[in-house]
Every structure is written in structure tokens, then in C-alpha cells.
Image: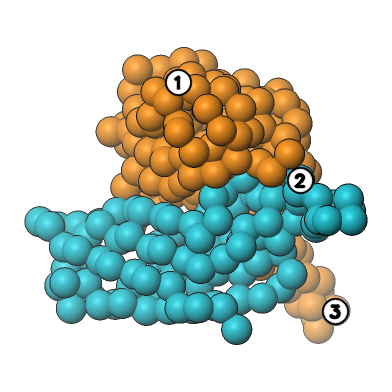
Amino acid sequence: MADPMRIRAQAAGDKATVRVLMSHEMESGQRKDAAGALIPAWHISEITASHNGKPVLTTEWGSGVAKNPFLQFVVKGAKAGDKISVTWKDNKGDTRTDEATVI
Amino acid sequence: MQNRRETLKHSAIVAGLLATTGFFPQHALAFNQSAFDSKTLDQAYKALGIAAPTESADIVLTAPDIAENGAVVPFVGATTLAGVKKMMFLVEKNPSVLIAQFNVTDSVEPNFSIRSKMGETSNVYAVAVMADGKTLFAKKEVKVTAGGCGG
């Protein structure tokens, strides 16, 4: 199973900046293995972020996002103590959800 | 007077209408494979169902002038405009030009940061799709010394 995401959510005024570092190979589908065969694309394809249970952001990614991907976004109206949850799903159907509290 | 058959028919029609509005999230989140397979900017815009964007100083794209490592290039796309529905990053010379698409809700700012792979020196585009259908972009050329797509 994938390594946990590192999520940091920092409140400033009436919003919070959320930084997420995910652990994923993000195989582009362009590389070849030692035998010369293409290594198939394997990448996070969809991410949903929620604030106190309410979905606030969905994003779709292709194979061009860097390995162990970083994502930063800003949630309006978030304050210290609120919960931010991030779920990713990859193109093989694997999925992972992690949560953090806004500080 | 509405009988049972009419009621069922009306329910089916209402459900159909609700589905097209994106009320059922499964449909709205369907991954747009053809957009992410696009090899040119125009193909990507067409697959995304948007008009080719016009350049706008209101879209701010931050990316390095020179990316030492093409495997990890940071992009920040932001705008102070209101009414943004989606934002995307595209890399013109990548094997797949569309890198990421963000569906902006009222609860997040139109301000996103990711790290992308770049195969070679290329123009990078940050595109915003507005609620009124306008599409706007900012672009920047990022020089890449060591390509990151694995070729």
C-alpha cells in the first residue's frame, strides 16, 4: 500500500494554504525497461480535497506530473482546528486518503 | 390526473436532467483520457471542449527561467479574477501536453502549485476557464537542461 501523504495546512487570516506531498511513482509511460519494452503509464489521475467533510477541490492529473507529486492550494474560510482530507486515485484504481488538521 | 405511469416517466426525466447538471458527481469526475492523451495544445483544448484561449495579464504563471532538472519543475498558476471555473497547466513540447486540470469551487482560490515533468525546453501555459466561457492564458518559456520524461 502507498506511503502516507504529508499534508500541512496553515491558516492565515480567513483562509488556509494546504501543501500536500504524495508518494507515487508517476510513471510517464515514456520510459523503456532493460529489454526495451515501454513501462506502462501509472500515475495519480484524480484528487479530491475536502474541508470539514465538504469537497472543495477536484483535480485531474496526467502522467506529466512529477514523481512524488506536490500540490498546493488555498481553502477559503478555513481556520485552525478544521479538518482537511485529501484522496487520490490512480489509473490502476488504487486509492489513498489522508487527513490533517489546520494549524 | 397524473397516474403511476406518468409519475415514473417524470421521475426518469428529472433524474436525467439532474445527471446532466452534474448533480451526480460520478459523471462530473470522469477522467478525460483524450484530453490527457493530446499531443498538441489545440488537440488538448478541443478535447477539453474549450475555445483556444487568449493571452491575459490577469493570469499569473510562475515557473523557473531554467529548470536544471526536467523531472521536477515547479509551476504556480494564479489569478485574482473572480468566476474561474477551471485552471490547467500545459507544456507545449511534452509528449502529453496537458499536465493537470483543477476544478475550482467557491471554496478554493484560483491559485495552484504543482511540480511537472518537462521533456525539453518548451513554453508552459497556465489556462483559466471562466464561468462566462471565456478562456485566458499566460505563458512562459522554461529552458530545460536535462529532460525529465525518460526518453
What is the chain identity of the residue bearing mark 1? Answer: B
Q: Residues within 10 Å of mark 1 (few under 14, many from 20)?
A: some
At horizontal 62% and vertical 45% (from top left) the residue drawn is A64
Query: CB under 8 Å between callouts 1 and 2?
Result: no
Tell me the number on the disc at residue B140: 1
Foreground pick, B9 / B85: B85
Residue type, label 3: Arg
Foreground pick, B99 / A2: A2
Q: Residues within 10 Å of mark 3 (few under 14, many from 20)?
A: few
Element type at marker 1? strand
Q: Are marks 2 and 3 on the same chain?
A: no
Q: Are marks 1 and 2 on the same chain?
A: no
Residue B39 vertical position relative to residue A50 in the rendered view, above or below: above
Tell me the number on the disc at residue B96: none
Image hue for chain B: orange
At horizontal 81% and vertical 50% (from top left) the residue drawn is A32
Question: Can you identify the residue that label 2 sits on?
Answer: A30
Cα–Cα gap, marks 1 and 2: 24 Å
